[in-house]
Image (cartoon, rainbow, N blue to C red):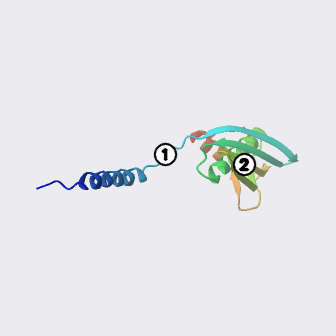
Amino acid sequence: MMPNPAYPLALMAALTVSACVESEGEVAPFKPDYAGIETRLLDGDLVNFLVTMRGARDPKDVENYAECAAAQYAVIRGYGFARHLRTNVYEKGGLWHGDAVYTISPALPRGLKTIDAEVVVSDCAENGIPMV
């Protein structure tokens, strides 16, 4: 009986597909590079945070970085709370940029997007996200 010449090719194709399926479920480790925070006091309790990072998985990672900056800023200034107003995120050439605006206040402000600054600072430290 003569071997089928297509057999080695079929076996190689099956192994290749098998390798692709196995690696499909793997998730690359999250290794962000936090490249900096710039803080601008706009007016009284209104603060702008410009953050830059590489390795973000999506805009939420950039938003979290800005929130950490806002929380730490509030704590440094002696305030216990911040309220998120807006965050614009864009990516260019692998570098992610966030432009966020928060109000800071000593008491819990009105609104849905408020943060307890000390709790957020603790979470950021635990997750290795740098702050102001």
Residue 108: x and y in percent read 74, 55
* Relative to 115, 47 lies left or right: right
104 displayed left or right of 129: right
Question: Which quadrant of the view contains residue 17?
Answer: bottom left
User: Identity of the amino acid at label 1?
Assistant: Ala
- Secondary-structure class at tag 1: loop
- As drawn, is 26 to the left or to the right of 118? left
Judging depth in this view, the residue of 83 and 35 nearest the camera is 35
Which quadrant would the N terminus be assigned to in this image?
A: bottom left
Residue positioned 87% across, 47% down in the render:
42
Q: Which residue is tagged 1? A: 28
What residue appears at the point 76 percent right and 49 percent down from the top-left corner?
Answer: 99
- Depicted 109 relative to depicted 37: above or below: below
Count of number-bearing discs? 2
Residue at mark 2 = 98
* First in sequence: mark 2 vs mark 1: 1
